[in-house]
Amino acid sequence: MSQRTYNQLWAEAQLELSRLLAEELSDEPRHPEKDRVVFFQRLAMLYVRYIQIYRQLEEVYDQVVHPQKRRVIRGILEGVMGRVLELKNEMVEKEFSEYHYMDDVLHDLKLTPKELEIPVPRFFISERSVEQQGQKKMLTEIFKTVEVTESPEPLTTKDMSQEEAIKIIQLVERARQGRLRAKLNSESRRMNRMQRIKDPGAAAMELAAVSIQKVWKGYRERKKAKIAWEEEMIFLGMAMDPKRRVPGPAVIAARASEAVTRIKLEEYNADYQKSSVAVTNQLRDVEGHDMRKAMKDQIRQWFIECRSGFPERLLLFESISAWNESKSCIFNVFLFCLNFIFKSDAKGSFPDYPDEEGGGSALIFAEKNPIQMLEEIAAKEVEDAKKPKEKDGKKEKGKKDKKKEIEEEEEAGLKMLPSAFLSDLEVENKTFDDFWKTRNESRNFNQRHEVELIKEEKRKDIEAEIRVQVDEQMRQELAEWKLAVDKDKGGKTKGNAKKKKGSKSGKKKKKEKDLTADRTLESLCQELVEQGLLKQANNVRLQEYLGDYNYLGTTLRQNDIEPMPSLSDVRQVLSLYAILPLGSRAVHEKATLIKAILLAGPAGVGKKMLVHAICQETGANLFDLSPLNTAGKYPGKSGLAMMLHMVFKVARLLQPSVIWIEDTEKMFYKKVPKEEKELDPKRLKKDLPKFLKLIKGEDRVLIVGTTKDPISADIKSLCKMYSKILLIPRPDYGSRRILWRQLIRKQGGDVTRALDLSSLAKISDGYTPGHMVQVIKSIVTKRRILQQARRPLTAAEFVAPLAKIDPVFQEEEEALKNWYAKTPLGKKRIKAATGKEEGKPPVKSKSKMKK
């Protein structure tokens, strides 16, 4: 598509976003909703609408080439991602479930389940910083060197008993005799055939011709009937046209165009970066001196005004209207003077210079109109008047608080939680409406960057940069002025305000000791790779985790039956909890912090694949702290502390990072089995939660645990470690059908009419995707692929290998469901379902909040 089309798509997404913001940020606050179902429907509607905006913006951002537009779209896209995560967390809190079913919402909005999928933004990988690219190159080199230096396993001769040797000899000899016997039989059949052939008569010739015609006509009619049936199925939409299975010329051309656009995008971005540097240097050289001089003059004028004192306030307030009408440059001087009437000492002393943390001199010249200043003055006067009355009114205040608590309890209901992203979205949306929506770009057909916009943006940066330098000089100058005046008066110099503030500072927090301060990042990575704690993730994408949508979820819940989530639900929840926060720094810092996720499910459902998919989609590094992997490494208490310190330090430096703990139930065993006591699987149980607490919002580090037997672990300590627990079930019928089709094709097999996928999906109930892969690899071999033209694959071929594998029985799945019901979220869900928890949420009184 053309750039004009993507601009229109952006405008449509912005229009829908402005409607949503108008609903959420309306002047009239919504009344608390007492009905939990109605409130959840409102949340679900907002969630689905935000996902549609997210999908549009992600597509636009991938193809728009204008560098300055891309920066605006990126901000809006990350804001929408954050809002989607906030709504997801709210839905979890209100419905007490990690999985939600919104069939009715999709029906109302006329959407398909496919449009509810959350695509992984492509810029997570394509727009890595130069530093991250350098780190990736360093790691790949380390992996290569470790692979080369690893010595191959020595060939060991296995002792063989006499009976085993005799069996092997017999097996080989019988095979040789069988081949000779087959050869003799084929020769004898050929001799018999030659003896039967005699000179046929005319009747025999005619009979042969009739039989040949009969076979040929039957074959031709069957072929015609098959073609007619296939055409009918294609016409009815029950089969895909073979022409559409292969990408057509239009699709190929569109993909090529997208690839060319991405190359052009990189070229335009490089030009924009060069132009930004050139414009910055030019502004610094041309306008920097004037900016510095103007700032110094303004600050000196402020010093003088504060020192000399001011006229009476009433005379200044009466002249506001006259100054406002003139709107001359003197009005700006008046504004800053009025703004600091109350900041300066009215007795005629020099003011304290604002510190750098408070904003420096930028705080002095904050642009405020006279009305805002009057409001500030009035508010201060009201506060001053209230202060002496505070002690007398404590008893009255207590009575009022009780009344307010009673009113709050009466008006109790469900409210939307405050958002950290709506304000940013409002600002970005205003930027689009004010600037990009009506901008005429008829002369910018190639969508190159605009120099004037760069100047406006960089001028503010240069002004802030110069202001820091000017503040340092003016602080020194103010100190000299104060010293000179105090000497003239014969008094002592006043202490620095900063020292006074510093003396009041409380206790400093203990910093984490750096046990490897003298070592480089490369040496730490080298050691972790050699020890097998830092691994290379498999090349697996989240899209390859196949599964169908759960179409009966809403219906089952309406009948008070808790449905098991489908594999599609698992894929969607994991992309929200793990991939989006890890891929975007802005989203991770503001969104609800998720430090650890537990994936619980039977063996073969794809837990390990999901961990590797998270790493591949976000470009994260994979650390393995599984009990079996850490056994025997870094022994002792000091060794364990060093191992955890190194892993978490490197994970922070190479973020985003994923710390994987396979078979995490071994860390929390109720009772360690005898055969595993030597491995000491519980050695990380005490120290790992301490390091988990050190992960903050700016650290894109995620701990992912996988378990196939969570019942054997202590559920209290396990839930304390993992804030999110995701139950991964066996695949349902729809997911199994998709899995059989895609996995057979991936192995090289052809799915024809002879292969009854419906029956195969039905009889494979209870089998996991891992079992299916195992069976397909045993059947669809290279030799079988060559035979497909003559003998297509059938469902019966897969039945025998399936029968040899034990499935996941219903009892095992029920045991997992019962275990999940004991988790904190599972308990809340059961209470809500049984009606023990009322629709009204508990109201926290102000006195309790203070405590």
Image (tube, rainbow, N blue to C red):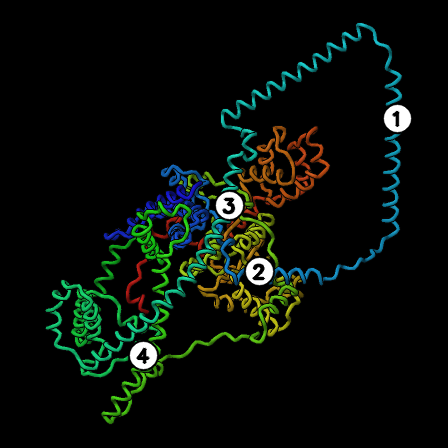
Disc 1 crowd rating (10 Å Cα; few below 14, some 14-19, many 20+) is few
| Gap in angstroms between the C-alphas marked 4 and 1 | 109 Å
SS at badge 1: helix
**Mark earlier in primary sequence (3, 2):** 2
> Where residue 456 is drawn, which disc sits there?
none
Residue with the mark numbered 4: 474
Nearer the N terminus, badge 4 or badge 3?
A: 3
Mark identifier at residue 136: 2
Look at label 3 and name its amino acid.
Answer: Val
Of callouts 1 and 3, the N-terminal one: 1
Q: Nearer the viewer, residue 755 or 420?
A: 420
- Contact check, label 4 and label 1, Cβ < 8 Å: no
Foreground label between 1 and 2: 2
N-terminal-most mark, 4 or 2: 2
Residue 840 falls left or right of residue 205: left
Residue plotted at (73% across, 37% down): 783
The label on residue 187 is 1
Circle 3: element type: helix
What amino acid type is highlighted by mark number 1?
Answer: Glu
Would you call the spot at circle 2 few (<14 residues within 10 Å), some (14-19), or many (20 or more)? some
C-beta proximity under 8 Å, tags 3 and 2: no
Please state which amino acid type lies under the numbered disc 2. Answer: Lys
Q: Is tag 4's residue or tag 1's residue first in the polypeptide sequence?
A: 1
Left or right relative to 702: residue 381: left
**Label 3: which residue?**
260
C-alpha distance separating marks 4 and 2? 45 Å
- Mark 4 vs mark 1, foreground winner is 4
Dot 2: what SS?
Answer: helix
Disc 4 + disc 2, Cβ < 8 Å: no
In the image, which is nearer the foreground, mark 3 or mark 2?
3
Residue 681 shows in the view: yes
